[in-house]
Image: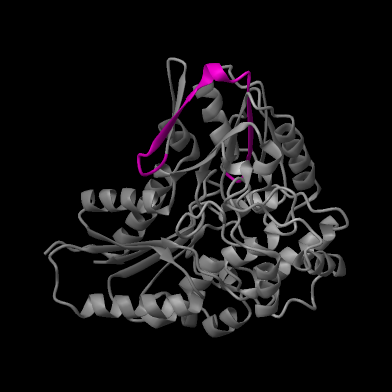
Amino acid sequence: MISKTTSQMRTDATELFLHGIEAVDAYTATKRNLKIDGGTLIASDALGCSLQLDLAQFKRTLLVGFGKASAAMARASEDILQGRIQDGVVIVKKIHGRTPKKIAVIEAGHPLPDARSIEGAKRIAELASSANEDDLVICLISGGGSALCTLPPDGIALADLQQLTLHLMNSGASIKEINTVRKHLSQIKGGQLARLTHPATMLSLIISDVVGDPPDVIASGPTAPDPTTFRDAQEVLEKYQLQHNIPVAIREHLKQGFAGRQQETPKESDRAFRKTSNLIIANNLTALRSIAEKAAKKGYTPFILSSMIQGDTRHAAQVFANIVRELITRPATGTPLCIITGGETTVRVSGPGKGGRNTDFCLALASKIQGFENVVILSAGTDGIDGLTDAAGAIVDGVTSRQAVEQGLDIELALRENDSYTLLKKLDRLLVTGPTETNVMDIQMVMVG
């Protein structure tokens, strides 16, 4: 029987995670899915479906984008279109590597929007509004775009949105729920960028950071029909008991929208979408499949369990502990196992500590797998960032909990105070990659030697 030591599996888990990141590299994904054949622009999605556009029919090609991957996507678009882009602007959290040559890059706030988020959004809105019927607008969308591209309605201040965003992030609300609210406090989100761009032709290339890849949720769906309403936004706030904690201006705007005195976001039948196409060019499953292929070459039996892991981190930790318990009690398979999952959990923040959903998940899991031999579990964000920390996530095993006790560290206290990062850093269990310029949610790996 082939076996792996815990040390080997920790090394392998890190290498496999980085390999998965490479598979969803924003520059590579854009070049893979956007090509020019003669005078025809060919765009395809992650499933192989494609559309063709005759570039001769357009007087101008404009480019806009927002999200953690948008600068890398913009560089690839420039390389592909080779001088055909007349104007463009993208908004990112921070620029890494070389910048696009002609497309302007604005660095803005994330996860909380800042003044630069509004400045960039205004420039994008102006450029989109300038597009005519014979123009092509290429929109590059990736995770983080909701905060980075922020243009609130008149009467709502940046500080109001920052306060609301913080409340929603700490409430345990899902990204779908958070973006339902955001879409109704914006002049761009929820299909409204498509409305601004009409009657131009719009092509959106999207790197998905949302479970199931719904275009109307990713970056709050600026170029997709919005199935949600002002009523839905109010219900999210009521569900998490936030309706009395939010700024008065926001509460009043949603109230006016619910009463029909604010324009609703555009729905599927809106003319804004007649010449709009949304293509998913990379997603979580892209990364998981790549990891599975690489794991097999490293001597593991890989199995992709799901790319749609959701729910509270503590509940997810219990489910994974049960999976591990089942795996280690079954007859040996002859080779080490690598169970691969992806998705995005949520964590309800009630303490003053430091951490993110991945470190919280790993720390909650550590005590549940105490004593399990030859078991390693990794959980990390593909953007290289977990919450407001510099770590992507963490790697734990069957001795992590014991080592915490030996060093006088209290796991239960750290969990109550949402201080997973601090404890795992003391144990040298953090996974630090730095920003990756892409984002397809989180990846978990269960390695059993």
Q: Is residue 20 left or right of residue 171?
A: left
Residue 327 seen in the figure: yes
Look at 84% across and 68% down and name the residue there. 252
Name the foreground residue: 353 vs 119: 119
The quadrant where residue 101 appears: top right
Q: How is the image coloured?
A: one colour
Residue 396 on image: x %, y %: 41, 69
Look at 59% across and 84% down and name the residue there. 413
The magenta segment = 45-68
Image position of 342 with respect to 382: above or below: below
Which quarter of the figure is the N terminus placed in?
bottom left
Name the foreground residue: 253 vs 36: 253
Look at 57% across and 68% down and name the residue there. 174
Residue 182 on image: x %, y %: 69, 59
Is residue 64 on the magenta stretch? yes
Residue 131 on image: x %, y %: 69, 29
Is residue 180 on the magenta stretch? no
Q: Is residue 213 left or right of residue 134?
A: left
Residue 372 seen in the figure: no
Name the foreground residue: 176 vs 275: 275
Residue 271 on image: x %, y %: 62, 43
The quadrant where residue 64 appears: top right
Name the foreground residue: 400 vs 110: 110
